[in-house]
């Protein structure tokens, strides 16, 4: 198991948050791999992120947050059972498919009635959400078909100069992207590592 990730100097986090608020796309460390993120409500930034990854918009995107309150505006009604299920795993390395708010932009939910969300346990990713004062789109930093980047060097190799910023820091102790579970049933949709 790898050591706990170090938190970069605060100015790096604030710089990345400033770029996100300005419509940029940044890479940052998460629990297992580097993520690509942007402001979820900025359509141009989201389209750019999808183009960089070569990911179809119909798949939808994950949102991460430092706390549940940052995710609440993106969600529809949650049952008590859903709240209990997610409460046992957050903050953590589990992403939940939960009912999407009826007005949630299509670029976030894709072709689904649910939205994939996670309260991150990674200190750098959480600090970035706090500094941006928002949930963030968070998808693995890789071009479709390639392995997700686990270091800043791997991010640079895949994306060259096409990102607006790479937030330095170490990824967490996991070896694969987050587990994804269905909020209605608790069923594992994608195993994590």
Image: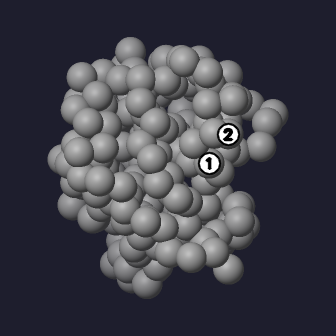
Q: Position of residue 120 (x, y in %)?
A: 41, 64
Report the front residue among 54 and 142.
142
Residue 114: which disc? none
Q: Is residue 85 left or right of residue 68?
A: right
Residue 184 seen: no
| Quarter containing the N terminus | bottom right
Residue at (70%, 45%) from the top-left corner? 148
Residue neighbourhood size for the residue with mark 2, other residues' Cα within 10 Å, grouped as few (<14), some (14–19), many (≥20): some
Residue neighbourhood size for the residue with mark 1, other residues' Cα within 10 Å, grouped as few (<14), some (14–19), many (≥20): some
| Quarter containing the C terminus | bottom right
The reply to whether the C-beta atoms of the residues labelled 2 and 1 are less than 8 Å apart is yes
Q: Report how far apart the C-alphas of labels 2 and 1 lie in the structure.
A: 5 Å
Q: Which residue is mark 1?
A: 151
Residue 117 vs 123, above or below: the answer is above
Give the structural element (helix, strand or loop) at label 1.
Answer: loop
Give the structural element (helix, strand or loop) at label 2.
Answer: helix
Q: Which residue is mark 2?
A: 154
Q: Position of residue 36 (x, y in %)?
A: 51, 38
Residue at (31%, 37%) from the top-left corner? 16
Residue at (55%, 67%) from the top-left corner? 172
Q: Is residue 4 left or right of residue 124?
A: right
Residue at (65%, 51%) from the top-left corner? 150
């Amino acid at each position: 198991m790898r050591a706990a990730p170090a938190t970069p100097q605060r100015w790096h986090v604030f710089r990345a948050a400033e770029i996100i608020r300005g419509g940029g796309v940044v890479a940052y460390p998460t629990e297992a791999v580097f993520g690509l993120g942007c402001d979820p409500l900025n359509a141009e930034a989201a389209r750019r992120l999808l183009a960089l990854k070569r990911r179809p918009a119909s798949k939808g995107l994950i949102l991460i947050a430092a706390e549940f309150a940052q995710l609440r505006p993106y969600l529809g009604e949650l049952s008590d059972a859903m709240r209990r299920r997610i409460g046992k795993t957050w903050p953590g390395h589990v992403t939940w498919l939960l009912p999407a708010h009826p007005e949630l932009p299509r670029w976030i939910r894709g072709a689904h009635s649910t939205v994939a969300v996670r309260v991150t346990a990674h200190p750098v990713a959480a600090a970035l959400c706090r500094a941006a004062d928002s949930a963030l789109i968070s998808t693995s930093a890789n071009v479709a078909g390639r392995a997700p980047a686990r270091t800043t060097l791997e991010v640079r190799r895949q994306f060259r100069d096409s990102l607006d910023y790479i937030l330095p820091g170490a990824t967490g102790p996991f070896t694969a992207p987050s587990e994804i579970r269905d909020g209605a049933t608790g069923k594992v949709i994608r195993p994590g590592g």
